Amino acid sequence: MAYAIETHELSYRAGKNFELREVNLKVREGAIYGFLGPNGSGKSTTIKLLMGMLRAQGGQVAVLGHAVPKEMPAVLKDVGYVPERPHLHPFMTVAQAIRYHAAFFGGFDAAYAEELLETFNLPADRLLSQLSKGELGKVHMLLVLGQRPRLLILDEPTDGLDPVVRRDVLTALLDFCSQGSATVFISSHLVHELERICDWVGVLDRGRMIAELPMHGFKQGIKRLRVGRPPSLIGDTPFILLMREQTPYDEIWVVRGWQAPMTQWFDGAGADLKEIVDLDLEEGFIELLRASRVPA
Amino acid sequence: MLKQLIRVQWSRVRTPVILVALILFALPLLMIRANGGPDSSAVDTVGWWLHSAQVIGHAIPILALVAGLYLGIAAWTDDAKGGHVYALTLPLPRERYVVYRFLAGAVPITVPALCLLAGCLIATASVRLPSGVHAYPIALASRAFLATVVCYSIFFAIAIATRRAVLIVMGLLVTLIAAELIAGMLHLDFDALASAATLLTTWPGPLAILAGHWALFDV
Amino acid sequence: MSRARVAGLAVASLLTLAGDALAQEALGARAARAEALVDSLARVDRATHAAALAVAAQGRSGPVAVVLRSGSPAQLVAKDVWRAFEPLGSASNAEIERVVLVEDGVASPRDSVGGREAVVFGRTGGYESGNSEAIAAGIANSAIAALSAVLLKDSLVAAWLQRRFDPRLEADAQKTQTVVELIDGRWTSTRRCLSGSAPDCAVYLGIELHPDLRERFPVPDIRRLLRLQASRGGALDQRRYDCVDGDDSACAEVWGDPGEPPAGWDARAALVLFVRERYGADAWRRVMADTTRNLGARFTRATGQQPAALAEQWRDWVLEKASHTPVTAGFKEITLTLLASGVLLALAARSGRWRA
């Protein structure tokens, strides 16, 4: 299996309050990988490590088969990166920014960029400093898509954008993906946004990877169960019990890896499975976080 | 790639650079406009050219310093604003990017230098120098260019220096000042700052180019 | 003990003896002894001559040691030695790179005369010692001593020169100082001389055939001088105020006989050097041997040149040969710039800031 991004035991410490601990990421080529996590969980730090902007204190990183940060120029040739905050030179016009960017990337598709300029309805002759936040977000996306990269790394690309712009940006992203086999690694704390486009998802919390699974597994595999007469001791289960919470009459369980035949396990354990509730991605994400934060 | 960097850098700095260039263009003309006061006649003016060339010439290294300071810092301003993120996402080795950035920042220096050369040539052509008195337009303009490049390099390096490097330099300065104060209190013959300044401004000190002679007209 | 040190001690002994012997003699006799002393020291070192002449002329009897040191920067150490040089006007121009003078074990480097002088019109004192030896090499030691001695005897030349000098060691300095003086342009004739007017050069040097004081210092010069005097708080009487206010006759009246040409001592000394170099030592001797009261006529007879022509030649010689630091942007400057920029660029490339 070829991976566009692969990290092994990636560790990084910034000061006393933040540490990225042994993060293992595997992003398959061609996947649209949603990198979820609450604010401050370490998503941007992980991305900076992937982009060679920070040096890891432990572990290995490989992007598109090249070691990071040793082979960065080779990596960056095929990577389009949209950072969390705007970083383009503000005194340039949109057209100048496109020309400037194109000069560094040999395979820059000027015609496609021109097309996107129209799609995004961007004023070519306006200074970047005079653009709205939404327009600036579109310019960023235009530039990286124009590169026609093999891997797109997007760090909260739609954060702070209005819904219309967000839709435009994500649509352009999906269009681009449909044209080829690019891999997309997109971080966000806006879970429902990723639900629509991602086929894989990884969840990071407090510097640790707490889950990495296909989107369908995430959406279908996490359930909230209402259990009557729950057993006091739970042995081996066919699912992963993320959390159990007592209510006056029964218990609420959040489980992962749920499949329909697993109801039989409750019969065997003498418990009464009263209700199975499907969680959407956001609810699942929240439950996942809650579960990961409960002390062992 | 480099062409784009140069183009962008030029559009960034052109207004102040053109201003400095105009001043440098005007300086040599100012030298020959200077006259000797009410008592002077046409035949008296050579001494005043030499005199004013000497006095006004002092403005050239100062302008070189100012231009170097501005261009050195401006070379990194936009990268620094974006936390250098954009530069780091470009697919070329870091060292090569620094060299390109340096060259792009240095190219605008040619404009004031060429303007100074033009001003010097016009000034030289406008006066009739007696035998034994010479004009040095090319040497003066070249010297101004070199001095600006040195100043630019210094501020280019400072603008990208790590906090640690800045602290080391500041620490060195503070140590020199402290050593001088202590030596003064102990009545020792030790002038650390002056020695350091001499070391920097005399051959082969990096600032020796600034300390030279800056007169357009001389014997 | 190094060879230089042995030589130095030998010279020291000689000087001590010479100083003792010369202390009580009259000026002329001292100069004659100085000449003999210079001849006797001719083998040692030209720079030593400065010390020898100085000590001899001063009539100094103190224990002065002259130590030669080659290849390393030296300092004139003893405090009194500075003063010992002054009668010959060569203290600040001595070949101090190659001479160390030590007196009675006093070793205070503060009295070094090896430091750079101020930069005046791009001309620093540093160049003087380097070039003067080459010029000095062309002049016989005995001739120098003889010149010094003769200068003291001729009252007209002595008055014109105002100071005695050692031409070996000051040639460049005098040319340079003359250029500074010309550029400074204090007087009308000075400014016109620099601008190429040969008659004005002759007026400036005071060798015009028919000296007219009003030509030497025209009314505007006098007025300017009085204004300067008044601006410095000097009291002016009524006629002087009249001059400043525009009364030309008052200017001629109050100025009187200045007795001096506009040129300073360095410019005049440079003329002596020029005559010696261009027309030979004999020409200078002829100037000195001539008893005519008109200095211009003396120069004309000795060199065959009219004062204006001679002054013009002198002007070109001074301007062409004065030591100075011209505006240069050659190999050295380019190399330095490339090196400095290269090092700074390397430091910038290694900076970790933009990766952090």
Image (spheres, coloured by chain):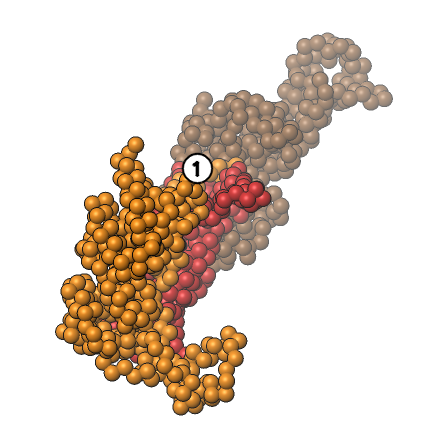
Chain colours: A brown, B red, C orange
- The residue tagged 1 is C350
The quarter of the rendered structure image containing the N terminus of chain C is top left
Counting the numbered discs, the total is: 1
Q: Is residue C277 visible?
A: yes
View extreme (front): residue: C24
Q: Nearer the viewer, residue C125 or B207?
A: C125
Residue A152 against residue B133 in the figure, above or below: above
In the displayed structure, A258 sits above or below B129; it is: above
Q: Which residue shows up at 26% across the image and 69% down it?
A: C154
Local SS, label 1: helix
Relative image position of residue A129 (x, y in whole percent) = 54, 55
Is residue A172 visible in this depiction of the protein? no
- Residue B50, x across and y down, in percent: 34, 69
x 65%, y 30%: residue: A17
Residue B167 horizontal/vertical position (percent): 54, 40
Q: Chain of mark 1?
A: C
Residue C146 x, y percent position in the rendering? 22, 59
Q: Is residue C325 left or right of residue A190?
A: left
Q: Residue at x 27, y 82 (%)?
A: C211
Residue closest to the far right: A248
Residue in the foreground of this view, choosing between C68 and B196: C68
Q: Is residue B16 above or below residue A151?
A: below
Residue at image x 48%, y 37%? C352
Dot 1 amino acid type:
Arg
Q: Residues within 10 Å of mark 1 (few under 14, many from 20)?
A: some
